[in-house]
Image: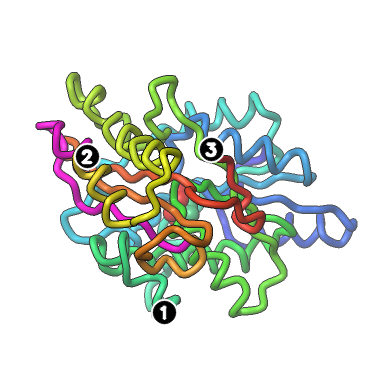
Amino acid sequence: MDIIRTVEWMKQVARAARSEGRILGFVPTMGALHEGHLSLVRAAQLQCRPVVVSIFVNPIQFGPGEDFERYPRQFERDCALLESLAVDYLFAPEAGELYPAGFRTYVHVEGLSERLEGRSRPGHFRGVATVVLKLLEIVQPTFAYFGRKDAQQARIVRQMVADLNLDTQIQVSPIVREPDGLAMSSRNAYLQGAERQAATALFRALTAARREIEAGERDALRLVAAMRAVLDREPLVATDYAEIVDADTFEPVLRLRSTCLALVAAFVGNTRLIDNMVIGPVDDELKVEI
Ligand code: PAF
């Protein structure tokens, strides 16, 4: 696996692959790789060759007081994992390579960026959209792979790609979970002792909503109440939001009619976690598991 540190070198490699008619796959990450990331790499390898993975802890998607400084950085371990999967290229630029002095251009996807994660983390999606656009412009992959744990991020990236007429297809892969249901996340590494067990409350809240739906409940407020009841029972958990939204618009719904997402965000101790589940009929566009 070649480790590429500069934008110019990455562009050259990608250009060469495209000129040979190859189908380039791209998996953007912030490192601290786990099985969720590896599932994206495997999905890419089924469709593409070569596959480029990026590791870049993007400073502009973290707000003041968030965990940019302490975000887990495990470069050697990540490289070994990617080598073991026979990934072709790792793009790992320094911050100054993507944001040189004088950088001034940011991307904002209106509407979708303001709710849920966007409301709790102002500026987060501006940082995500900006770095994803830059990475897609540098690599120009045929396919780029995102995890559905960050469902709102995936929706925003799809919207940006459509709006800006980018020649990349966005593929969204199912959430990968620990055996007890906790969604895999690099931030799970922060969870200490009892917090790890308490963190399963997010998944338990989502499954409580799904159980209600299976029992015939269609009223979104009652489903939200069922989720909140599970979260509120955990003393170590402080709920940020629990919502049922339309899977396309991310606007709250009153009744389940179309494909919806149940979304939760909560602090477990100092660690902020998110999770979601598709509820209602499956929409192929979202490539969901149900
Ligand atoms: O999901 C992530 O890890 C990040 O938000 C991404 C897409 C790599 C952009 O920094």
Q: Is residue 242 magenta?
A: yes
The three-letter code of the residue at mark 2 reads: Thr
Describe the element under mark 3 as helix, strand or loop: helix
Q: CA distance from mark 1 to mark 3?
A: 28 Å
Are there few (<14), some (14-19), or many (20+) residues within 10 Å of tag 3?
Answer: many
Q: What color scheme is it?
A: rainbow
Q: Which corner quadrant holds the C terminus?
A: top right
Judge whether 71 appears above or below 155 on screen: above
Callouts 2 and 3 close, C-beta under 8 Å: no
Say which amino acid is labelled 3.
Answer: His
Query: Measured along the vertical axis of the image, is residue 68 above or below residue 117?
Result: above
* Quarter where residue 273 is shown: top left
Chain part drawn in magenta: 230-246
Asked if residue 259 is among those painted magenta in the image, a careful observer would answer no
- Residue 189 percent across, percent down from the top left: 31, 29
Local SS, label 2: strand
Is residue 72 in view?
no
First in residue order: circle 2 vs circle 3: 3
Residue for badge 3: 37
Which residue matches tag 2? 271
Residue picked out by circle 1: 110
Q: Is residue 188 left or right of residue 168?
A: left
